[in-house]
Amino acid sequence: MDDTTATTASTASADTASPSTPTGVPAVAGKPAAVPSPRAAASPGISFTAVSKTFSTGRRGALRALDEVGFEVASGEFVSLLGPSGCGKSTALRMVAGLEAPSGGEVRVLGRPPAEVVSEHRLGIAFQDHALLPWLDVRGNIALPFRAVGRRVDRQLVDELIELVGLTASAGLRPRELSGGMRQRVSIARSLVLRPDVLLLDEPFGALDAVTRRRLNLELQRIWAQRRITTLMVTHAVDEAVLLSDRVVVMSARPARVVDVVTVPFDRPRGLELLTDPTFHELEDRLTRALLTTEADDARTGAAGPDTEDSS
């Protein structure tokens, strides 16, 4: 996706799983209790209803990327899409952003067609490729969506976001002077600058080293907790999905189907000590088994088919 598209964008089947503690992951005395599910909200922030997507591949015919996908993200909920590479997770995210249309079924954002929400600049996106403009400093890159939509720059809000992501001392630096983690924080701040109601995160930390990634996981949790924006994140990392999410939607290899929906039963804020919790590891094991099972099934049937541009 080019920088213009990224800046513009910035600016029910399997979801019937019970909101209670996941099967096989009982509440543990003295451990964090299950959080009441935000799904009690009157209307979902994001909904997929029997969504399918088929791409034309020229001489190779048609390629089915999504197959009857159904799930919801409640208002104020943080949900991760977890699945093998190339399964169509990013295709699903692009549908929420109004950049792809389903071949069948329906995608709704805030109860409306995605394009309407995007046109009102109520949806923000942060990508693995931060897409910062090299000639602008931190402040200029964060303010860029204001210029893209023809609004006057809200300098106070820009400064608040710079402080929120911990870059006050670096506000005058250009991307080449920032670390990879700092660039991603700028990207996240930019995705929030138009005060969106929905935030999409497409592997935002996928290119970072393990230590930086973990630190930014905690930073993202802190930022999300302050704003409680309806959030859908694509990730390959099982531990990241469990640490950050209220629920995790597991997708199969292509054509993608929802094979499991797991509720994460931990209070917030969540710290690094959670990584050693037995229940945390039980959730990781359940999600990993779901991924391995679907990959094995599809390898036997050859369902995944040829590669496409959607690598996630």
Image (cartoon, helix red, strand yellow):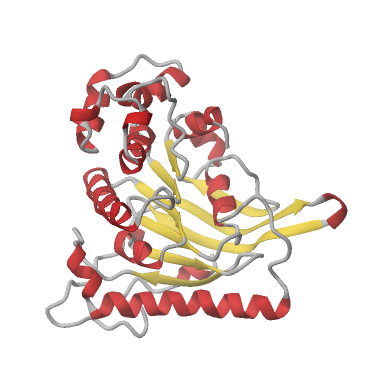
- The reply to whether residue 19 is in sight is yes
Q: Residue at x 59, y 75 (%)?
A: 295
Percent x, y of residue 214: 29, 56
Look at the image and tell me in which quarter the N terminus lies: top right
Q: In the orientation shown, which residue stands out farthest toward the left? A: 30
Percent x, y of residue 207: 43, 50
Q: Residue at x 66, y 65 (%)?
A: 255
Percent x, y of residue 63: 75, 58
Q: Residue at x 52, y 65 (%)?
A: 83
Residue placed most toward the observer, 277 or 169: 169
Q: Give the quadrant of residue 79.
A: bottom left
Q: Give the quadrant of residue 67.
A: bottom right
- The reply to whether residue 194 is in sight is no
Q: In the orientation shown, which residue stands out farthest toward the right? A: 59
Marks counted in the figure total: 0
Q: Give the quadrant of residue 77.
A: bottom left
Q: Is residue 3 above or below residue 252?
A: above
Residue placed most toward the observer, 63 or 14: 63
Look at the image and tell me in which quarter the C terminus lies: bottom right
Q: Is residue 96 above or below residue 252?
A: above
Residue placed most toward the observer, 76 or 194: 194
Percent x, y of residue 171: 25, 25
